[in-house]
Image (cartoon, helix red, strand yellow):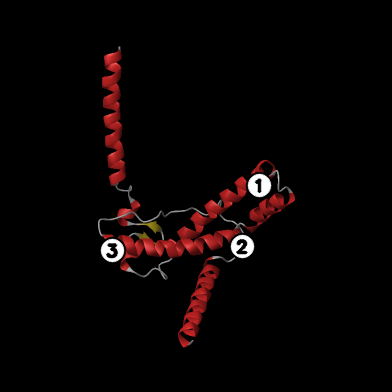
Amino acid sequence: MRRAEENRMISELVEERKKQNIRKYITEFEPEYNKYEVKTRAPFNTWIWRLNLLRKTREEELRDEAMKAARLKCHRTANAFTKCTLDHPREESTTCKPLFEPMQTCFHEEFLVEMDKRRRDMSRNTEWWWQNIYSEEGEIGVQAGDPPITYVEKVGDFAERVRDKLYGWLYRNNK
């Protein structure tokens, strides 16, 4: 019984902390995706698997908070779409499509804005493995350059070259 109470208290504290973080970044509940310039991307993978795990875990934490904040900011477009679907339940795919696209755009763009704010917050992200790829101005170091070519891209390029050669042999014999 005591363990369950401790777990409940810990989960309440975690939820309270998440709400404080969301409120820290959102001063007013209006979309700002046309007024804000996004300067960061998701962290690139490195050859050090521990760094990848740490950065992915942090990115997931930030993603959860950013999506909640995006939902709060896009409440008007979401409410308009929901009202349309409730008013026209049988024709929602045709009648409400013009309302769905602005809602989707708002969610996507606001999510990117909120992720950018959270990635660039150096008072929260104090670890060295985060501060060597992001700063308060944006991306730095290896992260600021072009993404490295991954194994999948190398295999895809090789497959395209093989396909081109195969097509060349097949069509040359048919002419």
Q: Residue at x 30, y 56 (%)?
A: 141
Mark 2: give few (<14), some (14-19) or many (20+) Cα within 10 Å.
some
Instruction: Say the numbered circle drawn on residue 60.
Output: none
For mark 2, what is the residue? 29
| Quarter of the image where one finds residue 135 | bottom left
Give the quadrant of the C terminus: top left
For mark 1, what is the residue? 99
Looking at the image, is 151 positioned above or below residue 8?
above
Task: Kindly state the secondary structure of the residue where label 1 is placed.
Answer: helix
Q: Residue at x 49, y 54 (%)?
A: 112
Question: Disc 3 residue type?
Answer: Arg
Q: x, y percentage for residue 169?
A: 26, 21
Looking at the image, is 107 positioned above or below residue 121?
above
Dot 2 or dot 1: first in sequence order is: 2
Viewer-side residue, 43 vs 95: 95
Residue 120 in sight here: no
Question: Disc 1 residue type?
Answer: Leu
Task: Kindly state the secondary structure of the residue where label 2 is placed.
Answer: loop
Residue lying at the far bottom of the rendered structure? 2
Q: x, y percentage for residue 99?
A: 66, 47
Dot 3 or dot 2: first in sequence order is: 2
Distance in Å between CA atoms under marks 3 and 2: 37 Å
Number of residue marks: 3
Question: Disc 2 residue type?
Answer: Phe
Distance in Å between CA atoms under marks 2 and 1: 20 Å
The answer to whether residue 48 is left or right of residue 41 is left
Q: Residue at x 69, y 50 (%)?
A: 85
The answer to whether residue 6 is left or right of residue 128 is right
Q: x, y percentage for residue 73?
A: 60, 59
For mark 3, what is the residue? 50
Q: x, y percentage for residue 25?
A: 52, 66
